[in-house]
Each structure stands twice: as structure tokens, then as C-alpha cells.
Image: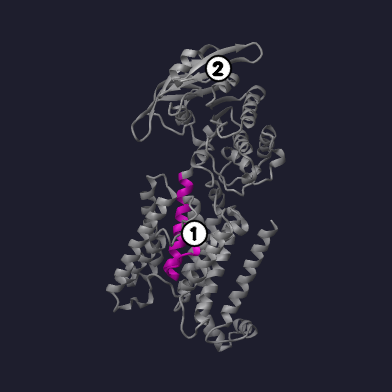
Amino acid sequence: MYKKMISFIVVIGLLLVVSLYSMITGSIEITAGELFKGLFTGTNENVEIIKDLRLPRIVIALFAGAALAVSGVLLQAVMRNPLAEPGIIGVSSGAGFASIIMITFFPTLFFYTPLFSFIGGAIAFLLVYMFSWKSGLNPLRMILIGVAINAVFTGLSELTSSMNASSMMSGISVTSSTLTMKTWDDVQVIVLYGSIGLILAFLVYAWCNHLGLRDKTLKNLGFSVNRARFVISIIAVLLASIATAIAGMFTFVGLLIPHIGRALVGNDHKLLIPFSAAAGALLILTADTLGRTLFSPIEIPASIIVAVIGGPFLIFLLRKSDRIYGN
Amino acid sequence: MEIKDISFSYQDKVKRLHHVEAEITIGQITTIIGPNGSGKSTLLGVLTNNHQPQAGQVILDGKAINKYKPKELAKKLGVVHQQNTAPADMTVEKLVHYGRLPHKNTFSGKVDKDDEMVEWALECTGLYEKRNDAIDTLSGGQQQRVWIAMALAQDTPFLFLDEPTSNLDIYYQYEILELVKQLCEEHGLTIVMVLHDINQAIQYSHHIIAMKQGKLIEKGNPKKIVTKQMIQEIYGVNVVVKNDDDVGMYIVPLGI
């Protein structure tokens, strides 16, 4: 219990520190004092610029991280598979492909991008599910099918964007993510749908716990496994799609964070979901902040930093504990 | 509980149960025996509504079991499966609490009755001291008892056990069987189980259902139906059936 509390306190503390640091660091440098004064009085010109350019980016990084990490937790529960993750099984690339199609062919419907992403993510998820259903959702098979679906959608996205290389596509990258050029409109979308998704995710934490037992056992307890799976899947796809639509493709977050979470706060989703939300937010914000400050004025996409930090960290974690998930 | 003319096959269309006809006597222990692949566990699956038979019905309290709402059925039948999974760090008490699911609505909290039943289930299975331990720190016999405790917390008149003694040392096998006997005698539960060991089946059951290749070969009181011929026919094993004044009836396998 002690370890769990400390973990929560540390992550939330870091989240506050990094958020503040991220706000005052960059091409315009100010002190924390100036920042707070400026936020309340609105007279400091630098603070106004930060409010317009840097703050949206920070909020989006936080929500995208939380959404992707929680999406990973939910998918792992639904599929009973420690490797399930929106990036790996194709949900994110499905969502990404749909939003690229959207922007390429119907740029006027920009406002509906989240909806399209959701549909794209849901289709990808459905395909993975359908093709692995026959094998009784065999974990290995499911991941292989997910990898295949992911490859197809990533390929399609690259195809679409290379065919439109001359047009306005430069803003969207297919396989990585930059959080530059984000506006308060983007913030509104991700905060609205992201909050809904995160709240719903927390409401179904008990169902996620139930799915730790076998289907047969649950059925004999009168628990409707299929309904729970369906609802949790929809929430997971919503979270992954909204993050992808606004912040771009991030692999790894949904894999890395839940595993860290399980090691630190255990398998109970009542703690794992909020912890993963906080830790995911911390990860992407840290990555994005490093990305834009390390080699300034060159920006490194946050997703690249996540992958570079995340990979070794995950290997370290796996080597440390052979007990990853379930039995 | 009546088993009426059940036939069942999996998706592969090979018939696993052929016109099985039997009844389960209330308040007694019924054991299903038979060689591997004889359909014992499949029959148990049909009885617990995990498999839908292509023909025939299982009638419980005057109603076919597939007509019950899932939660209503879960208030009547508790099932302990052969293989079980739980998150490794879950505590015994939490897992046993899952047995209360059929008595809850989606978002309703704990009530006193829930705690009462869980306490009772932990007492019965001798797990009271282990209640705060994580599942993966327990021995095989203790884990098996946790799953039985979960089914007991379900507070059902029927308890089904699929090979509850498999993979356990002999001491723990008898520990489970004694528990089953006690649940039947002291708490009036109706018990249906699948066992591999014929002597254990004779010793602990009021009724035996003997299966071979999906067909019910013999059913009734073990003292009457277990004979040299019957074992030869079902298992293809040569045995002698002995009767001892002290230990009752038992069989000794001689060879094949």
C-alpha cells in the first residue's frame, strides 16, 4: 500500500513540475513568477505568446498521453494480452489513416476529424478481433494479426500522403507526431472527448478487473462477458482515436505505461487506470518538452523521444520482473 | 435436476454426447466417471449451461437451464472449473467476493449478506487465515480451495466441480473430497463432480454416472453398478472388486 501511495505522489508531483518547466522553457524563457503574474494580469507580452502557442501544446500532450496509456490498459484487459496496445494492434494507424483521408479529400469537414478517426480506429480493432476470434483470441495470433493490420493501414496512410506530397499534407506525419502548430480548437476537442473517455474508463474499472478471470468462470457468475468486452473496447478505441486525431501517432505509450503501472500499483484497475493516465501524461509531456528544448531550434518529434526512452526502459522492466501480467 | 436426452457436438461436428439421460438427486453427491475423451467434462459443461446441446434439455426446478437469465442461473448453480486464472496479486478475499457477483447490480455496493457469505465460504474452506494473501503465494491445494470458496460465496443449492482433485497430492485430494462431503452433509448442497479415481468416486458418491465415448453406460449407486465387467467395458482395465468390512468397497486394478 505504501509503495502504491508513493508511486502516485511521485508521478503527480513530477507531472506538476514538468508542466511548469515546460511552460517557462523554450525559445521564450521567463521565470515562474513572471508566468503567474502574467497569467493573472494579462499584461506580459511573452506570457500571452506562451498562452497562445505553448499552453495548447502542453494540454494536448497531457491528454494524449493519458488517453493512450488508458487505452492500452483497457485493450490489455479486454484481450487478456499484455502486448495489446493501440499502436501495435493497428487501432492508432486505422484512426490515423481515416484522418488523413479526411484531410486530403474533405478538408472542409475538418471539425469532424475525431469522428472519422474513431470510425477508422474501430474498423481496425474490429478486423483484429474478427480475425483472431476463431483462434479463441489466442494472444500470439492476435498480436500477429494486429501487426499485419497495422502495417496495412500505415502503408495506406503513407501512400495517401505521398500522392499528395505537394499539397497541404506537410502538417500531418504518418508515423510520428509533432505537437507544433496546435491551437485552442484542438485543445477543446481533445479535452472534451478525452475527458469523456477517461471518465468512462474509470467507471468500468470493475469490469476490467472481472475480465482477469476466465470467460467460463465469469459466465457461471452470471456476468455478461461480451457486453463488458464491447463497452470497454469502444472506450479504448475512442481514447486512442482522439489522441491520434489530435496529437498524431504514438506507439509504445499504451504498452510501456500500463506495464510500469502494474509493477508499481498492481493489477487492480481501480488504481491502475488513474495511475496510467497520470504517468502517460507525464511521459508524453516530458518527451515533447525535451524534443523542443534539447536541440533547439530543431524540434524532435515527441513520439521519437518516447520510442528512444521507452524501448530500453521496457526491456529493463521486463528483465527485472518476469511476472508481467496475469499468471 | 433432470437431464433429458442430451446430444452435443462441438463445431467440429463430432458427436461428443449421445442421448444422455439421467437425473441429479437433490442433497446428494453425484460423480461422473469415464476414461479420457468419454465426455465427462462435456456433460458437466452442458449441465452448467456452458455448452448448448443440439438436442435435449437440462431441466432445473421445472425450467430448462438455457431459459434462465444468466444471473438467475448463477444464483442456483456454482461451478468450479478445472482450469482457472486470476491476476497474480489478487487477494483470496477479493477473489472470493467475486462469488457475490450474481447477487449484485452493476454499480451497487457491498451489503452485509455479501460479507457474511464470504466469511462463511472462507471458514468452510479453511482459508480464513489466508484471506489477505495473494493468490500466487498459495499452494495448489489452497488455490483449488479458493475457487471452491468463490463458488460457495455464490450461495447456490447446486455445486459443480470439474476434476477438483487433479494435479493435487493425495493429502490435498482427500482434503477437497472431505470438504465436498461436509458441504453435502452439513449444508445440504447438491454436488455433481467429475473424478478420475474410481475408488474416490465409490467412497464419496451417492450416485455414479459412468460414461464411455459420449454414451451413458451405467448410472446408480456405486455399490450396485461398479463391477469387474463394468470397469472392463468402460476403461478396458482388468480389476478385482473387493468388499472389506472396515473400508467398504474398493477396486484393485490388475492390468490390461
Q: Estimate the x, y position of residue B236 in percent, counting from the top left.
A: 44, 20
Residue A181, percent across and down? 44, 79
Q: Is residue B65 left or right of residue B13?
A: right
Residue A49 drawn above or below residue A119? below
A278 and A287: which one is in front? A287
Q: Is residue A71 positioned above or below A283 on the image?
A: above
Does the magenta run of residues contain A236? yes
Residue lying farthest to the left in this orientation: A163
Please tell me which residue is depicted at 36% across the width and 53% down the height of the picture: A127
Q: Which residue is mark 2?
A: B251
User: Magenta span covers which residues?
Assistant: A226-254
- Kindly identify which chain the residue marked by label 2 belongs to: B
* Quadrant, the N terminus of chain A: bottom right
Q: Residues within 10 Å of mark 2 (few under 14, many from 20)?
A: some
Query: At 66% from the left edge and 65% from the top edge, which residue is drawn?
Result: A9
Residue A249, compared with residue B256, is above or below; it is below
